[in-house]
């Protein structure tokens, strides 16, 4: 059995993917804007991920913009049948690298067509609608109009499944009245656990939960408890953070991001890491500790 198979699988739409996937945001330039410092390494990271068995890649055409999808296409097209590429829409980048909400019918339709073109696909397996009512995280607000546009593009055959990102439990419930929601992608990791209840609800419903910033994102997780556990079991702190997520709930699909093959190998090796119940209790204290 390969490393990755030990992480198990979960349903994503009508496909089944390994729980250890890859998030492609780090492949664009600094600030997720413009070309990467090392394009050849970005191509190599993607090829190695797929060669190691990764069958779930998370991306967006607003990474770069366009850059990340163009690199995915260069590295992996034509895609193997088992590869599920998930993208997200709902934002456009300003010339100053800002992230701006783009929810109109024209903007969403353009975004889906840009993803299809830059990835070289006829249909996108999963499109997440990224809600952006606040830059601080999920906030209430109606998603009815943009979801209705995506559901229409789904009926036209351009999208197979729809997911939601940066959303509240209420928005997930309301979204389900408009279309099937196959996954939710929110910020969640050892130290940021606002979605504990939502994850359990989604697990009961058989819906995938895909945490973004599993390693802390732009400010990687730092905790003395995490370092102590890692030292004791002979892993890195980042590996323990991912192994904890795999243990946290069966519907969690991991998409850690990296621009380096060295970190990719470390991240894919976590399926081999065992965490005892005592260690899990210890790691649980991280979210309760005061920020430092
Ligand atoms: N829906 C949304 O709103 C949203 C928002 C953000 C991200 N996302 C998605 O979620 C994915 C994951 O998030 P992310 O990439 O921002 O954050 P992340 O996975 O939490 O962390 C990535 C950071 O950790 C570093 N890193 C990765 N592996 C490491 C290792 N083994 N040891 C030490 N450092 C390591 C990376 O640097 P190196 O490049 O040097 O390895 C990078 O700085 C993204 O790729 C994207 O697809 C979605």
Image (spheres, rainbow, N blue to C red):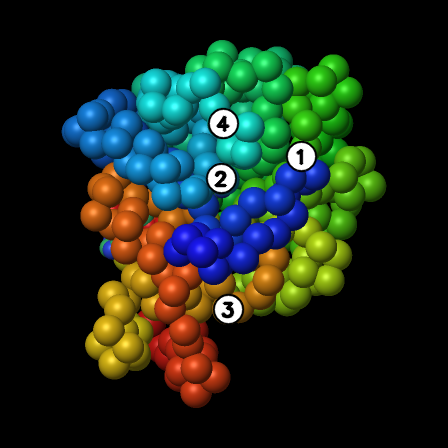
Quadrant the N terminus occupies: bottom left
- In this picture, is 153 found above or below 270? above
State the mark number for residue 247: 3
Whether the residues at callouts 3 and 2 have beta carbons within 8 Å, the answer is no
Indicate which disc, 3 or 1, sits on the residue closer to the N terminus. Answer: 1
Query: Whole-percent x and y of residue 258?
Result: 29, 44
Whether the residues at callouts 1 and 4 have beta carbons within 8 Å, the answer is no
- Helix, strand, or loop for circle 1? strand
- Helix, strand, or loop for circle 2? loop
| Mark-to-mark CA distance, 4 and 2 | 9 Å
Indicate which disc, 1 or 2, sits on the residue closer to the N terminus. Answer: 2
Whether the residues at callouts 3 and 1 have beta carbons within 8 Å, the answer is no
Residue ID at (42%, 31%): 99
| Mark-to-mark CA distance, 3 and 1 | 26 Å
**Drawn side of residue 279 relative to residue 27, left or right:** right
State the mark number for residue 55: 2
State the mark number for residue 162: 1
Residue 127 vs residue 262, the one in the foreground: 262
State the mark number for residue 80: 4
Residue ID at (41%, 61%): 271
| Mark-to-mark CA distance, 1 and 4 | 22 Å
- Helix, strand, or loop for circle 4? loop
């Amino acid at each position: 059995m390969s490393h990755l198979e030990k992480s198990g699988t979960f349903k994503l739409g009508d496909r089944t993917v390994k729980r250890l996937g890859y998030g492609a945001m780090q492949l664009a330039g600094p600030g997720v804007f413009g070309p990467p410092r090392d394009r050849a390494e970005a191509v190599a990271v993607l090829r190695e991920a797929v060669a190691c068995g990764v069958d779930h890649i998370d991306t967006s055409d607003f990474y770069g913009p366009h850059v990340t999808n163009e690199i995915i296409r260069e590295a992996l097209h034509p895609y193997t049948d088992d590869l599920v590429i998930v993208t997200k829409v709902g934002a456009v980048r300003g010339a100053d690298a800002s992230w701006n909400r783009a929810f109109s019918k024209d903007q969403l339709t353009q975004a889906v067509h840009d993803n299809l073109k830059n990835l070289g696909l006829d249909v996108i397996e999963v499109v997440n609608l990224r809600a952006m009512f606040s830059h601080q995280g999920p906030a209430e607000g109606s998603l009815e109009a943009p979801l209705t546009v995506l559901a229409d593009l789904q009926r036209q055959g351009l999208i197979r499944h729809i997911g939601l990102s940066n959303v509240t439990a209420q928005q997930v419930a309301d979204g389900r009245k408009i279309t099937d929601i196959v996954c939710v992608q929110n910020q969640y990791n050892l130290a940021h656990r606002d979605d504990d209840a939502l994850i359990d609800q989604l697990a009961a419903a058989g819906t995938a939960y895909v945490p973004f910033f599993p390693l802390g994102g732009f400010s990687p997780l730092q905790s003395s408890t995490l370092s102590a556990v890692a030292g004791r079991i002979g892993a890195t702190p980042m590996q323990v953070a991912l192994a904890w997520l795999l243990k946290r709930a069966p519907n969690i699909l991991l998409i850690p991001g990296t621009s380096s093959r060295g970190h990719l190998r470390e991240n894919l090796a976590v399926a081999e890491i065992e965490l005892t119940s005592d260690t899990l209790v210890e790691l649980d204290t991280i979210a309760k500790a005061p920020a430092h």
